[in-house]
Amino acid sequence: MSFTSPLAQAAPFTPANDAEVVERLPARAADDPTLRRVESLRKQLAAQPQDAALRIEIARRYFDLAMAQGDPRYVGYASGAIAPLASADPRDAAYWLVRGQLEQYNHDFEAALASLARAAELAPALADAYAWRAAIFMVQARAREALAECERLAPLAEPLWAVGCRAYARAGLGELQPAFDELSRAAGASPQATPAVRLWADTRLAEMALRLQRPEDAERFFRRALGLDITDQFLLAAYADFLLARQRAPEALKLLAGWERSDILLLRLALAGRAANDPRANEWTGELRERFQAAARRGDTLHEWEAARFELEVENRPERALQLAAENYKKQKEPRDAEMLMRTALAANRPAAAEPALAWLRSSGYQDPALAALSQQLAAKGGQR
């Protein structure tokens, strides 16, 4: 990514002094029952290093921790756990599933799609393989291909999951209102659904409600998802953004208390701290700046969207923000990626730079008043509608 120097690509990094932060260790296992369990499995693995199923289970648990807590070190641990299995070309669908999940986390989307297809080939009833392929297609703005995966998922998954997958894809194809109605009815009729699926469905409903300009409904869905008491950094980030957009920074600070370890949540803490004149704001801003600089030295491109927002809203460097947003959009094309490209192009007074996002908006049928307004502002400065 342009945030990093080309020299940093895959180069070993040596800290300049003893005070420079190289790595922040995850929570201690003694403080976290989930970590205690995975540490116990690691001890078992030390005594049984040939146990492939145990390696896959450890990797799966680390991946779940990374998704919930936003700490990429867990992805490294997961990759390390299954690395010895790669040379044997395993015929275990669980291996290919977790491998595909790790590849998508690292934004190696084509490899991830192939691994997940291999998982589905080995275990045609493995619903997760289709769900993750659908998610990747959505990240790539390939909603019709995502919808096809959702149709494959439908007979294999619990009803709310199946409806949610389909509705999520349809909402990206110009069918926002019927998709919202379908998922809302399904969520109301599925109190027995697993908490994880209910959280996912409520988060999607909140996003759709915002696009339908129904913020009260959006907040109701956000709060219902939070009430499930499941740790999910993406839900926390989405609700924090909702609060920040409504000048409710003190509530965002309360929501994210203690979440400094997650980069995406530390960004929201820094933004909320500045908005609320919290005395910790400068500390959070400095910490985040340090992390982005360290990521650049490592050649880590996972958080380009957050880095672009940081440059735009905190550092007030729109050109730098646009550079990052444009690099990010080459790989990730979700609506929020398009929005960031449009916002940074507008701020940098370079409307033509937003053309890739505008082209997607024109051709997809995607409905969002916020993106439509950005499109109009860019057009007023010479960009295409």
Image (tube, rainbow, N blue to C red):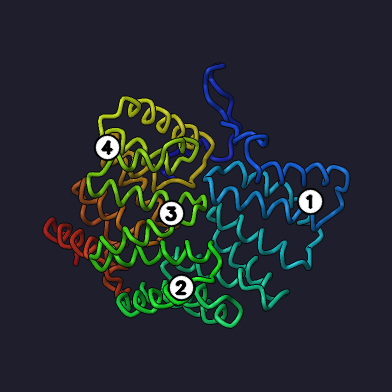
Mark 2 to mark 4 CA distance (whole Å): 38 Å
The answer to which of 312 and 30 lies nearer the viewer is 30
- Residue 226 is marked as 3
Asked if the residue under mark 4 is in contact with the one under mark 2, i.e. CB atoms within 8 Å, the reply is no
Q: Helix or strand or loop: what does disc 3 sit on?
A: helix
Q: Quadrant of residue 273?
A: top left
**Is residue 281 positioned above or below 305 on the image?**
above
Q: Helix or strand or loop: what does disc 2 sit on?
A: helix
Q: Left or right: 9 with respect to 362?
A: right
Mark 1 to mark 3 CA distance (whole Å): 38 Å
Q: What amino acid is at disc 4?
A: Arg
Mark 3 to mark 2 CA distance (whole Å): 18 Å
Mark with earlier residue (1, 3): 1
Q: Helix or strand or loop: what does disc 4 sit on?
A: loop
Q: Residues within 10 Å of mark 3 (few under 14, many from 20)?
A: some
Asked if the residue under mark 3 is in contact with the one under mark 4, i.e. CB atoms within 8 Å, the reply is no
Mark with earlier residue (4, 3): 3
Instruction: Determine the residue positioned at 31% across, 42% down.
Output: 251
Q: State the residue position of label 4.
A: 317
Q: State the residue position of label 2.
A: 164
Q: What amino acid is at disc 2?
A: Gly
Q: Nearer the viewer, mark 2 or mark 4?
A: 2
Q: What amino acid is at disc 3?
A: Leu
Query: Can you give x and y, in whole percent of width and height, for residue 67 in the image?
Result: 55, 51
Q: Residue furthest top?
A: 18
